[in-house]
Image (cartoon, helix red, strand yellow):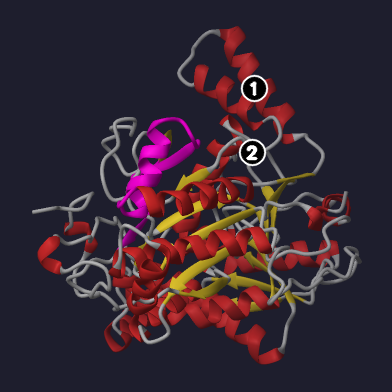
Amino acid sequence: MKLAQLKYSFLTIACFTALYLFGTSLEVNDPKNPPVSTINGDFTNKTLGFQRIYVIYQQDELSSKSNFEAIAALLDISATFIKQTTVPQATVLKQIKGYVASTPQIAELDTHARIYAQMVRDNIESALILDSNIDVELDLKERLASALSDVDLYDIIFVGHSYADPAEPQAKDTLTILAQTNQTTDPSQLMQRMWTKRKFSSQQPRVFRTTFPKGIFAYAINGRTARRLHRRFPLWLTRVNEDFEFILADVAMVGMNSTLGFQKILVLNMPHRHERRRNMNALARVHNLDLTYAKTVNRDEANVEAINNGYLINGTHLACYLSHLSLYRRIIAENIQTALIFEDDVDMEWDLKQRHKQIMDEVQLEYQNDWDMLYLGHCTSDINEPQQAGTDVELYEAEYPMCLHAYAVTLECAKRLLVLLEERLKTVGKDIDLILAVGTQFGAITVLGASPPYVVQVGRQELTSDISLLSEGDTAQRLFHSTLFHLGYRNIDPRTLPKYIQVP
């Protein structure tokens, strides 16, 4: 099977030493912006199969540049040398442009940003970016050919990173043994430790999906990804105080496509709610999401439906009810196997895809395809919810989930919900989320939840609601690192908000 056919989007190859890895990121499910093949397959040429090699060096460490020049001469490699931005230069940039990162972070970020700018200017579709102070295997070209021969499409290839990855072949066993023998003085355990390291480092190159690459001293990037990063760097530098390696890992990892692993993302939105559409489009740009908008039923339309059909609820609450029903009908009509549904008043964690990947890994491990609904966000506490103290996200089986601003639904579940909810309109005068919560409680559907929520409602204080008044209680919830707040689209820092909604 070709690697480009894999559903998940991050691969890694163990190649140099025990802790030197290759990795590749694929995005194979984005029809609007498909990846391009930028490896020419000739790993014996002077640029190792890429269009260009850039080597970063520091002005005060010319010996490392000389060392790389010796490597390049030995292996017949041609490279373009790039001076790293100095700390004094980064200090000036911080003052002039208002960057929030530390000066060493800015120096590193600016260096890579200049390389991406060169790639954009010169229309470079693939580049290998190296630090000058690296060492490589003598049979580097053969290892590259062995590891990458089947990789047709990629975004980022980590030619090396500095920590063993739990997803790496044999890494779990290796890490277990090393941890168990970390402080040992027993000769037999010391011998076992030595042979474990040696066996791990002697592996032949293999491709695997990495969970979190660490280290940016040797990576390849294609032109499309370089252009994306080039556009985003000014925003990151003014909003994010993080090392570049974490930013790059955030962008490249997760194994999540533009629909977060579901077949389609549907967003309920009224065309006249321009500020909500603006927010959703901003979230889509930052997180590389492919959103499909669906018109929300308005209050007047809902009232006509209530009169004509004898429904027991009306007004905006019925409009919300009918809007979700319309999406279930669409899912059925278009045979959408899994759909993620957003209401248009949501905000998301900055590390959305990392958190979502953790949840989807747990779903796959524990439930496979045996689930009906998955709440990425909910607005009240649940009796089954984990009571974790930290920020790590956990999966749980929901008992009484509330609010429908961010949830996934399967095709089979949509069929059952449509029958159930259409019948309840004439027999039960309740909001749709209350009916679904009761159905969950009685085991009619299998519903999973994520805690803490990583998609939440902005709240009525910042976005007026078409359904409820602010006097009925605000719906705003806590986020650890709000995307919209980072972008300047929110006035309230969600870190200061309660975890769940406050009802007077």
* Separation of residues labelled 1 and 2 (CA atoms): 42 Å
Residue sitting nearer the eye, 234 or 286: 286
Which amino acid is tagged 1? Met
Above-or-below relation of 500 to 243: above
Seen in the image, is 83 located left or right of residue 355?
right
Seen in the image, is 199 located left or right of residue 433?
right
Q: Residue at x 19, y 69 (%)?
A: 492
- Observer able to see residue 36: yes
For the residue carrying disc 1, how many other residues have a C-alpha within 10 Å: few (<14), some (14-19), or many (20+)? Answer: few
Residue sitting nearer the eye, 172 or 276: 276
Q: In the displayed image of the protein, which residue is found farthest to the bottom? A: 121
Give the image quarter of residue 125. bottom right
Above-or-below relation of 482 to 6: below
Which amino acid is tagged 2? Asn
**Residue 481 horizontal/vertical position (percent):** 32, 60
- Residue 320 in magenta? no
Seen in the image, is 76 located left or right of residue 420?
right
Q: Which mark is residue 194?
A: 1
Give the image quarter of residue 308. bottom left
Q: Which residues are magenta?
A: 428-457
Above-or-below relation of 500 to 29: above
- Observer able to see residue 85: no
The residue singled out by tag 2 in the image is: 369
**Residue 170 horizontal/vertical position (percent):** 69, 29
- Residue 445 in magenta? yes
The mark that comes first in sequence, 1 or 2, is 1
Q: Residue at x 54, y 49 (%)?
A: 419
